[in-house]
Amino acid sequence: MTWSAAARGAHQPDNTAFTQQRLPAWQPLLSASIALPLFFCAGLAFIGLGLGLFYSSNGIKELEYDYTGTAGPGGCSACALADRGRAPPPPCSCAWHFSLPELFPGPVYLYYELTNFYQNNRRYSVSRDDAQLSGLPSALRHPANECAPYQRRASGLPIAPCGAIANSLFNDSFSLWHQRRAGGPYVEVPLDRTGIAWWTDCHVKFRNPPPVNGSLALAFHGTAPPPNWPRPVYALSPDPNNTGFVNQDFVVWMRTAALPTFRKLYARIRQGNYSAGLPRGSYAVNIAYNYPVRAFGGRKLVVLSNISWMGGKNPFLGIAYLAVGSLCILVGFVMLVVYIRYQDQNDEDEDEE
Amino acid sequence: MDCSLARTLVRRYCAGEENWVDSRTIYVGHKEPPPGAEAYILQRHPDNRIVSSKYTFWNFIPKNLFEQFRRIANFYFLIIFLVQLIIDTPTSPVTSGLPLFFVITVTAIKQGYEDWLRHKADNAMNQCPVHFIQHGKLVRKQSRKLRVGDIVMVKEDETFPCDLIFLSSSRGDGTCHVTTASLDGESSHKTHYAVQDTKGFHTEEDIDGLHATIECEQPQPDLYKFVGRINVYNDRNDPVVRPLGSENLLLRGATLKNTEKIFGVAIYTGMETKMALNYQSKSQKRSAVEKSMNVFLIVYLCILISKALINTVLKYVWQSEPFRDEPWYNQKTESERQRNLVEYIFTDKTGTLTENNMEFKECCIEGHVYVPHAICNGQVLPGASGIDMIDSSPGTSAREREELFFRALCLCHTIQVKDDDDVDGPRKSPDSGKSCTYISSSPDEVALVEGIQRLGFTYLRLKDNYMEILNRENDMERFELLEILSFDSVRRRMSVIVKSATGEIYLFCKGADSSIFPRVIEGKVDQIRARVERNAVEGLRTLCVAYKRLNPEEYEGICMLLQAAKVALQDREKKLAEAYEQIEKDLVLLGATAVEDRLQEKAADTIEALQKAGIKVWVLTGDKMETAAATCYACKLFRRNTQLLELTTKKIEEQSLHDVLFELSKTVLRHSGSLTRDNFSGLSADMQDYGLIIDGAALSLIMKPREDGSCGNYRELFLEICRNCSAVLCCRMAPLQKAQIVKLIKLSKEHPITLAIGDGANDVSMILEAHVGIGVIGKEGRQAARNSDYAVPKFKHLKKMLLVHGHFYYIRISELVQYFFYKNVCFIFPQFLYQFFCGFSQQTLYDTAYLTLYNISFTSLPILLYSLMEQHVSIDTLRRDPSLYRDIAKNALLRWRVFIYWTFLGVFDALVFFFGAYFMFENTTVTSNGQIFGNWTFGTLVFTVMVFTVTLKLALDTHYWTWINHFVIWGSLLFYIVFSLLWGGIIWPFLNYQRMYYVFIQMLSSGPAWLVIILLITVSLLPDVLKKVLCRQLWPSATERVQSTCMCGHDHLPELTLLACPQSPSPWAMFQARTQNR
């Protein structure tokens, strides 16, 4: 027939294994006999892992104190009351006293925690200029539009660092004091304020503008600090390697949190006598209460925590592993029962057929 | 479609007002008619430019964009993009703009290129030179400058530049041969005839002197219909009026063959030619998958809108200060594919189930049977079954009748003889010493003439209107061909009127028994009828032959009658039919012929497989009931235990239609309970199945609306009966009735998907009506294949096409659709949940690059490859076990239950991703150096778990792992990791934010992040694994059983028992016995 003669040449697809759908293939099947051992193995592995995680999480010590909360001996409630009244609260200082009956094993980390603070709000979290923060002189003078309304001061001076995130920099400060013996003098525990931000952030992503005549202050000449800041960015810290845009407190703050309740690292305790942890005794955390939170119903906490290989105290992971592992085992047993019962039935069915 | 409808309406409206619009008048050679002639209103006609391109250079961009944005998905994204451009949004416009513009650009480039090719083809076509006659001289012009009324000269092997009326040819007899291969695929030579009065004009000067006008109908797309009239003005006489029919019309696209040159006058040009009218697009067919998908899409859009509403309301509740309203972001990709799940198959018999390779079996003359295969060298030998032969009835009148019968068969046909002097093909008639091939549109005719040749009479050729035959003594007999009353499917017969050398005029008529017997007044009707019925039972195609001797006066009358009908401009068809009716009567029956049409190979196997697959097979044929039923038995549509229900004219004559229908439905419904709950093997032996036979007349009674308004009643009852029958045979169907049946089923309340398969022109309407139309490329030309969605060479291919490829494509497309929705639910739902934790501020959870690339690259290729490669069971298994098709029947994988399962799975997974990460990040640090992660790490963690889960979910669904699947699935995951490392590893200078810098790497440096990723992936996949395993164990579908069997190594399924069982000797005899008992 003409069709077969004419059409074979023109329209027939290439006779390859791909077009003919005849590629060699592995054809696995998810049957009960495969799934059962899988479930049991996974269940056992998860339970084992879960137990490990659970115990390592339980071994982590954590102390926290809400210094905007109820009245206590440190006088922080008074500061909190003052905060409620005025928008920039009056400078106020208070203390949190606690005692450790035994060694708080190190390394110990000091965190602050804010609640009900929406750092992840979109309009808040876009309000920054990464080009400016990377030290580009042109961006320093011309902040991005996203920073508005913290782009320029009323005088027309560009704000450095611009944007809402920078403007709302957390400015409470903490110091830790140790009283070795009752009635003895308080000794200041050295706080390591470096190494609290990602290394890549404060070495690559955040950069100071090139100093003018060796002076960072001159480099920032012609810019204004954010309105809420009491001092310009180059005076954030006396340490020349930790000031300006690479100030680690600032960098930590600029990494916006995922959830409205969040912690940020304030300092590490790892120097001198305290490298192995906090020895027993009485302690006081002196707090300079500057940051207003009561206006939006937020709270501030100070947290002392040590850390294992899996980070801070987090019972979730261990419990979840245990739960899923047990579930796997349970399901495995259910399936085993089903498998045995229905296997017989299926065999009978096949016999009948 | 709407357009053509509107045009018809307009035309009809105009026709009511002014009659002239219905026809056009053409001045041949642009010469005004003599002043005395009737005045015509000149009409404007388009030039001969063919425009198949859609766009021009100027309107391409706007028109193409308009076309593309008419699709809902594109338009939706355009709106999203515009909204993002205008107002402050959480995601950059690039996120939704980039994929959209990619799609739009690629589509536009593709369409532009195709259109450019079309432009090129159009230009080539429009600029090719054409020979005109102008003032008696030959002029070359470009084809597009041709105008209606121009006289054109066409040479051999040239294509006609427009639709021409054939004026004269270089051949003396005023004929020419054309092939219409590019129009309808028929490569046979067709003969066209020049107008009688102009065929003498052989030179340019002569033709220039022609003074004539042509009236014809306005252009219409039917290739085979044309009515017109030519008025030739000769020297101040009254004009001579001649009829013009499609035999005078040379169509654009056809090619002139075997003729040196012809002259013709252009009547339809450019876009009005029949070829151009035929290229108009057909209505689009939509698949079941697409319909379900659109519903799902609407559901998701509703969910999306409600999500957006919830968020907006909550946002305003949460925040006192007014913010601008911003749309909530979503990204879904829609995909389209045409795939269908067939529930009903309507098949033609001749040429589809059977070979259409006719073989002359026997003929019966006055009760004596002649069997040509027992003939050697012109001698007739007795057949094996002791049938009367020639020698046993040597009476002279019988002898005379016998010869008349053979002559009748030799003359009564429309066969062309192709002289094969130059063709070295097989010699068809070795006896005559000269090879020739018979060409005809009907294979029956060829079989008959060839059979008669073996009985001693050879048809030689038609020459100068004389038909030449060679009789037994090798003498040439010449008959003048006076008239041909051509075949049509309504009359089901054809006739010729010839004049023998002795001057006697005969009318020979050949046709179906039902159309011949009522017109017979003489002859051994009963004997022949008995023989015909016997032959029909054996599945042979029977034709009856009759003749009538005409005296010259009668012939004159006939001529007048025919001429009157032929000249008519309006209702010519009807008038011709009436004339034929009058002429073909009072015949003398000569005999009957039987032609065997063999079943196509594996037709029975295919039908059986399709029935096992739960597909209802209906045979629709124009054949008589007995022949069709025999074929149905042979191809196992009916079995020995099938109880046949008849709904035929004969039965309706006995009882009223009402009673018959109710009786049948009672019979059927008694067993319907057992029929609906059938097991896997389908039509098992102990079950009673029913076969229904209905004929065209009964069908039209059922379809006819009642006067008392109970019109739907019978239809419902009929449908109810049909639904409970495993097989239905509709015989004596007119082409339109075939389409009617398909439509009836298509629009019944379950809205099943229908498939029609056929090979002939009479199946076209049915093929167009059904959801899926399949054309068999057969002997009856390519009309069916041209109008079909798919064309196959043989009926048996239907089995593989439906049961294997249909099954695969359905599995693939349903997974594709559901998976797309699933992965986007996984993608979007965490984003929705995050709004509750970010003050409803539309903060995005994922980075822009992730948003953009999720659907484009991270999760696109695995599902694409799945939908190309997946074979959940092997091809051979599917072919061996047709009942597997039942697992996917009725759109099983896209029903609401499945859709809801996938959606819940998506929501569950999304909850796991989000809250897993939430509890992980709540109030704690997850690194061993005490540093804290931010919101982008949170999003990246969710996204990583999501990409892995969604890809692994597909891996769980994949049953057929070729190296490409491995490459693509693991490659996608690897690509995600590599991309994330790169994306976060560099400060990208062109970005104005660096929020992803080192986020991914920092995340990977944290042990608990790894642990939580593993945990969350496991938890997300757990329910699906559980469901798969439990379902397989507790309620395995047939497919899953087969999969397990294959896995266990029992790869030797028993061969289909029914195939192996010996064919019953004569099922039809049992049917006969049963019907007689009733």
Image (cartoon, coloured by chain):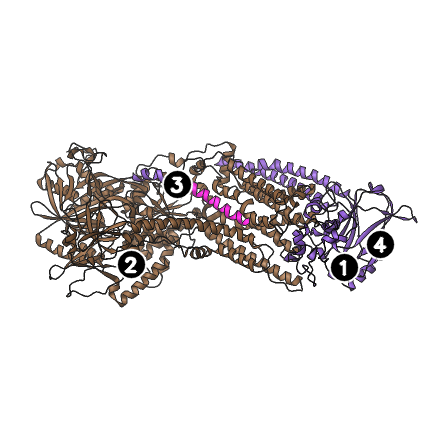
Is residue A17 part of the magenta span, yes or no? no
Q: Which residue is mark 1?
A: A292
- Type of the residue with mark 2: Pro
Mark 4 or 3, closer to the camera: 4
Chain that appears brown: B
Chain letter of the residue carrying label 4: A
Label 3's element? helix
The answer to whether tags 3 and 1 share a subunit is: no
What letter labels the chain drawn in purple? A
Front residue (pair B774, A249):
A249
Measure the C-alpha gap from mark 3 to mark 2: 48 Å
Picture coordinates of residue B402, whole percent (x, y) = 13, 41
Q: Nearer the viewer, mark 3 or mark 2?
A: 2
Q: Secondary structure at mark 1?
A: loop
Residue under label 4, please give it: A95
What is the C-alpha distance between the residues marked 2 and 4? Answer: 98 Å
For the magenta stretch, what is the residue range? B797-822
* Residue A116 image offset from top left, x and y in percent: 72, 57
Between the C-alphas of marks 4 and 3, the distance is: 86 Å
Q: Chain of mark 1?
A: A
- Distance CA(mark 1)–CA(mark 4): 17 Å
Amino acid tagged 3: Lys
Task: Look at label 4 and name its amino acid.
Answer: Ala
Which mark lies nearer to you, 1 or 2? Answer: 2
- Res. B904 in view: no
Q: Is residue A222 above or below residue B588?
A: below
Say few, some or many: other residues with alpha carbon within 10 Å of mark 1 (under 14 / 14 to 19 / 20 or more).
many
Looking at the image, the residue that sits furthest to the bottom is: B17
